[in-house]
Amino acid sequence: DDVALLLYRQPAPLEVEFPADANELANTRAALRGWLTQAGMDADQSLKVLIATGEALANAIEHGHRRPTEGTISLRAVAFADRVHVTVVDA
């Protein structure tokens, strides 16, 4: 009596760290858009996640860092069977 367990998660979590500079937002948004597509999210849901995440990133840059050259922003996205968890952190 053998038992086998196979765990598979697609896609791997997305982890992006970038300077606290608004010029970095387009590249970060593109990376998240591609990752959401890999996660199988439909276009309407993806747009909602992109808008919410974009607002969080912009706020982290604007309010978390007074000088453009200081600090970094981190974005982490994890796909679950029924949801996506996105975390934005300014350092």
Image (cartoon, rainbow, N blue to C red):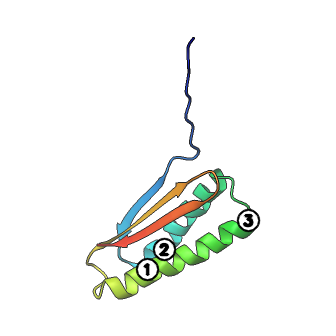
Question: Which mark is drawn over residue 25?
Answer: 2
For label 1, the crowd category at 10 Å Cα-Cα, with few meaning under 14, some 14 to 19 and many 20 or more, is: few
Look at the numbered disc 3 and give the secondary structure of its residue.
helix
Considering the image in quadrants, where does the N terminus appear? top right
Cα–Cα gap, marks 3 and 1: 25 Å
For label 3, the crowd category at 10 Å Cα-Cα, with few meaning under 14, some 14 to 19 and many 20 or more, is: few
Name the residue beneath numbered marker 1. Answer: 22
Look at the numbered disc 2 and give the secondary structure of its residue.
helix
Q: Earlier in the sequence, mark 3 or mark 1?
A: 1
**Residue situated in front as seen by the camera: 69 or 34:** 34
Task: Give the quadrant of residue 6.
Answer: top right
Task: Give the quadrant of residue 29.
Answer: bottom right
Q: Residue at x 55, y 35 (%)?
A: 7
**Residue situated in front as seen by the camera: 41 or 65:** 41
Asked if marks 1 and 2 touch (Cβ < 8 Å), the reply is: yes
Q: Residue at x 64, y 56 (%)?
A: 82
Asked if marks 3 and 1 touch (Cβ < 8 Å), the reply is: no
Q: Residue at x 42, y 60 (%)?
A: 16
Residue type at mark 1? Ala
Residue 14 in the image: x percent, y percent?
Answer: 48, 55
Tell me: residue 67, above or below residue 79: below
Name the residue beneath numbered marker 3. Answer: 43
Residue type at mark 3? Ala
Tell me: residue 14, above or below residue 73: above
